[in-house]
Every structure is written in structure tokens, then in C-alpha cells.
Image (tube, rainbow, N blue to C red):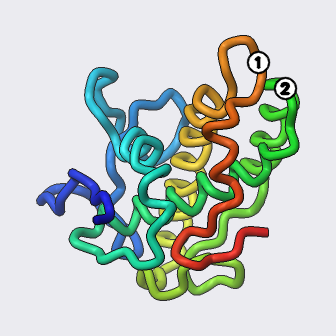
């Protein structure tokens, strides 16, 4: 059974392209609301559920937060793929920073990994809001993933990097 997000659709949460803009425990500037540091956020869920969810070929969506969980699971897979050849934390950090500098496509643009997962933006403002949210959540996920993928002494954690070889819902990561 696949792990689903504990964040269910709540009233008052801003949405863009059918995705809730959930709060994050972050210092990175962006459109996401700031969450309490002691609460679990969607990034914590994505990282903790990643190693179980990556084995599934199908993912039934129960809430719009599950869509974000699917997106983050694929992003973690991409990030681990980039970290696969990096033998030190310093080299891995450079690889992750370069990944963060890449263009972030939104639904309806070429390169978006799940065309039917989110609705296309209805305006340019919604597209920019969603792009900025995805950029912020990707940067936050990357920072937290480095502490999992590398041990405190800076060497790779093979129990995490081994999952770079997995395909999530049959999406091939390049």
C-alpha cells in the first residue's frame, strides 16, 4: 500500500494549478507560508515516504496534497540520480545547487514530468506563483535531502543513494 500525505484539503489554503501551496519549515524566500519548526511539513513526508513509495508503479490520489507528494517523490529521485556519482558532500552540494538553478517547468510547458497531474495555469500570474512555489519547495527538499544522502563525515550514504536506480511510476529519469 502506497503512503499518502496526511495533509488533506483544507479551506483557506491557496491553490495554484490545482496544487495546494502548503506551508514549509523554511528560510528560503518564496510564496509558501512559513510553518512551525516542530511540525511535519510536506517535504518531511516526501523524504520519509520516498524509499517506500518509489517501489510503486501506481499511485492513487486521495487529496491534492498527494499530487505534491508525487511531484516531490519524482524530484527526490532526480536529485538522487544527480548525487549518484558524487563521492563527497561538497561535490554533492554543487550538483544539487546546479539542479536548483535549472528551469522549473509548470503544467502545460514542455518538460513538465506529469502532464495530467496538475491543471494548466489559467493566467501568467498563476503560472509564476506555481513556478516560484515549486522552485522554493525543490530548494528546501534538496537541502534536507543532502543530510540524508550523506553521512555527518561527508561520505555517501549507500542506503539512500541506492534508490537512484529505481523508477517511480515508470518515469525514466535522465
Q: Residue sitting at 28 percent across and 59 percent down? A: 4
- Quadrant in which the N terminus appears: bottom left
Few, some or many residues within 10 Å of mark 2 (<14, 14–19, 20+): some
Q: Position of residue 147 (x, y in %)?
A: 60, 26
104 with respect to 85 (left or right): left
Q: Residue sitting at 43 percent across and 43 percent down? A: 43
18 with respect to 72 (left or right): left
Figure quadrant of residue 156: top right
Q: CA distance from mark 1 to mark 2?
A: 6 Å
Q: Nearer the viewer, residue 53 or 61?
A: 53
Q: Are marks 1 and 2 in contact (CB under 8 Å)?
A: yes
Residue 88's disc number? 2
In the image, residue 15 above or below residue 95: below
Q: Nearer the viewer, residue 60 or 99?
A: 60
128 with respect to 15 (left or right): right
Q: Nearer the viewer, residue 128 or 17?
A: 17
Q: Residue sitting at 54 percent across and 57 percent down? A: 134
Looking at the image, tell me whether mark 1 or mark 2 is earlier in sequence order. Answer: 2
Few, some or many residues within 10 Å of mark 1 (<14, 14–19, 20+): some
Q: Residue sitting at 47 percent across and 85 percent down? A: 120
Q: Position of residue 116 (x, y in %)?
A: 46, 87
Residue 93's disc number? none
Figure quadrant of residue 91: top right
Q: Position of residue 20 (x, y in %)?
A: 32, 61
Dot 1 corresponds to which residue? 154
In the image, residue 85 above or below residue 125: above
Instruction: Say which element carries label 2.
Output: loop
Amino acid at each position: 500500500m502506497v503512503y499518502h500525505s496526511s495533509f488533506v484539503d483544507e479551506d483557506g489554503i491557496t491553490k495554484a494549478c490545482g496544487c495546494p501551496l502548503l506551508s514549509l519549515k523554511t528560510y528560503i524566500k518564496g510564496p509558501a507560508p512559513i510553518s512551525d519548526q516542530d511540525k511535519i511539513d510536506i517535504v518531511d513526508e516526501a523524504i520519509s515516504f520516498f524509499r517506500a513509495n518509489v517501489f510503486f508503479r501506481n499511485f492513487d490520489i486521495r487529496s491534492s496534497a498527494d499530487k505534491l507528494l508525487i511531484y516531490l517523490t519524482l524530484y527526490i529521485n532526480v536529485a538522487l540520480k544527480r548525487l549518484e556519482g558524487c563521492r563527497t558532500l561538497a561535490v554533492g552540494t554543487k550538483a544539487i545547487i546546479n539542479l536548483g538553478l535549472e528551469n522549473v517547468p509548470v503544467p502545460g510547458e514542455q518538460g513538465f514530468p506529469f502532464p495530467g497531474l496538475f491543471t494548466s495555469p489559467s493566467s501568467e500570474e498563476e503560472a509564476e506563483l506555481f513556478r516560484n512555489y515549486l522552485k522554493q519547495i525543490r530548494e528546501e527538499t534538496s537541502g534536507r535531502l543532502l543530510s540524508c544522502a550523506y553521512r555527518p563525515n561527508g561520505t555517501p550514504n549507500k542506503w539512500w543513494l541506492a534508490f537512484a536506480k529505481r523508477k517511480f511510476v515508470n518515469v525514466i529519469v535522465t
